[in-house]
Amino acid sequence: MITIAAALTPILIFAGFRSYLNAQDARAERRNNLVEISDRAIDEVEQILSTVDTLQQIYEADILNGDCRGVFATLSPRVPQLSNIIFFNSDAGAECSALQATGARLVQVEAFELLRQGQTKVRTDAFFGPLSQAWLFSVMRRVEGPDGAFRGAIAFPLRTDELIRTIRLTNLPEDVELALSDSSGQVFGSARIANVDPDWISSATGDDDGELFVLNLDDQGSVDVVVRAIVDNRIYAVISRPSPGLFSEFTLRPLESIGIPLLSFTLALIAAWLAVDGLVLKWLARLRRLALIYGEGHYNFRIGNEFDNAPDEIQSFARTFDRMANRIAERDSSLRTAIATRDSAVKEIHHRVKNNLQIVASFLNLQRRQVSDPAARNVISAARHRIDALSIVHQTLYQHERLETVHMHPFLDALLSHLSGALGMDEIRVTIEQDIADIDRPADDAIPIALFLLEAVTNAMKYAFDENGGTILVKLQEDGEDIVLSVIDDGVGEQEQEDAPKSTGLGARLMTAFAKQLRAEMSSHSEPGEGYTVELRMPRSEREMKATDF
């Protein structure tokens, strides 16, 4: 399936790219249609504004002489969009107005200040006229005195509704709507749109071609919108029409480019899937179940006639599986017999080693009785304790079913019980306690762990306690990625043990060597009068053996 899909993917990618190009072309065509319509509207508005600029210059003298009403009466038939004619002096006071004698209020203060600063003319944003009670765009021209000083401004306010009525006189398609907007995005003369996104206004500013936007309306669906600047980036034409539906030429053309290849791609995959599933996958699933059965060790299972209807290659593979299971069953039986014989032999070896070590310990015990020197007797006793520890290790190994690992709880329990009796703890009122977790360790680690514990407990017995006795706690716990063996006593502490022989004697050297053999870190700490702690931190996982001198 992946191969077939990979073979067909280039065709699908090409179709998708072609569909993308068609979609871009369709979008450009939709934009061009609206831009073509907007060109006529923009020409109409620009012609009106150009006419107003010319008329302001022609009638400037009459207006300055106070004949605003006469000029308005003359121009209003020619410019029906004209709402008023006003002359504002340099203090922004209305000295002449066509609609009232005096007292007209200046609304577009910002535009007036631009004229004061030197601009010749300004076309303002939309504002609501207090006299006309309508929305207006005003064309304002700077008036200068003979000396060139700012004298005031002539304002020709234009009604937005009349401007819109003018541009709608052109032949428009029924679904196209023309409206006007100011630079803030407020739309006038539209039944669809109240405001446009200010970002659309920014995109249209300085763009002669215009850009197509899609506006989603709750009650009318999506609408194509083109925003184009008219003049001075103050007045914008907003042209809108409903977006094409699913079955329009603008959507069917891109869908056709990708739909047919996608349909072919899908049908090819379905056909390949049905063929592969019927001829291959169903039988591979049965072979997988057969492999799982054999993997669990059920080699006596036979396939029978389960693969009679399978393709010849699958039948041959299944029969090969069956023959392989027969041979593995025979070999498995032989290996199990060999392993059982080997395990019995190894257990017997451990048992005999344990017996031999006990004989050696008995010899040392007899030899100790023959020696009168206390130091020599102590040395022989220490050697006998170490041999006893080795004997316990071998006893644990031949009693355990798995020869490669040692279960630490029964192993250390037996070792500590032996040490308690061999060291005479009851006689000197020393109690040994244990907190051993259920942990398995490799058999190779059992001997160094046992001998390390023997030396640590022996040192605590020798140097930690006075005539009042005490307690020795042996802990084996998991700590993150490590296993920690701790020997903790509540004896006199380090202050009274600082010159003890254990710090430099054979026991200390042996403990260091055992720690290296276990790839472990040994540490000890104590406070005067608060006991002594020896800690052996061993890695949980097997690590590369380090060279030691032990």
Image: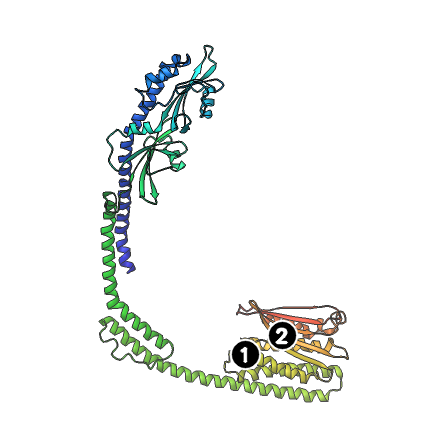
Question: At label 2, which amino acid type do we have?
Answer: Lys
* Mark 2 secondary-structure assignment: strand
Residue 286 rendering spot, x and y as whole percentages:
30, 73
| Residue 96, above or below 265 | above
Left or right position of 53 against 462? left
Q: Name the residue under label 1.
A: 406
Left or right position of 516 against 36? right
Dot 1 crowding, Cα within 10 Å, few <14, some 14–19, many 20+: many
Of all residues, the one furthest to the top in this rendering is 146
Q: Can residue 198 be seen in this view?
A: yes
Q: Is residue 550 visible?
A: no
* Mark 1 secondary-structure assignment: strand
Of all residues, the one furthest to the front in this rendering is 101
Q: Mark 1 vs mark 2: which is more N-terminal?
A: 1
| Residue 509, above or below 92 | below
Q: Quadrant of the N terminus?
A: bottom left
Front residue (pair 308, 149) = 149
Q: Distance between the residues labelled 1 and 2?
A: 17 Å
Left or right position of 261 against 107? left
> Residue 426: which quarter of the image?
bottom right
Residue 253 rendering spot, x and y as whole percentages:
23, 45
User: Which residue corresponds to the image point at 58% horizontal and 75% vertical from the top-left?
Assistant: 437
Label ID, residue 535: none
Question: At label 1, which amino acid type do we have?
Answer: Val
Dot 2 crowding, Cα within 10 Å, few <14, some 14–19, many 20+: some
Q: Which of marks 1 and 2 is in front?
A: 2
> Residue 208: which quarter of the image?
top left
Residue 144 rendering spot, x and y as whole percentages:
45, 14
Label ID, residue 475: 2
User: Which residue corresponds to the image point at 27% horizontal and 38% vertical from the top-left?
Assistant: 30
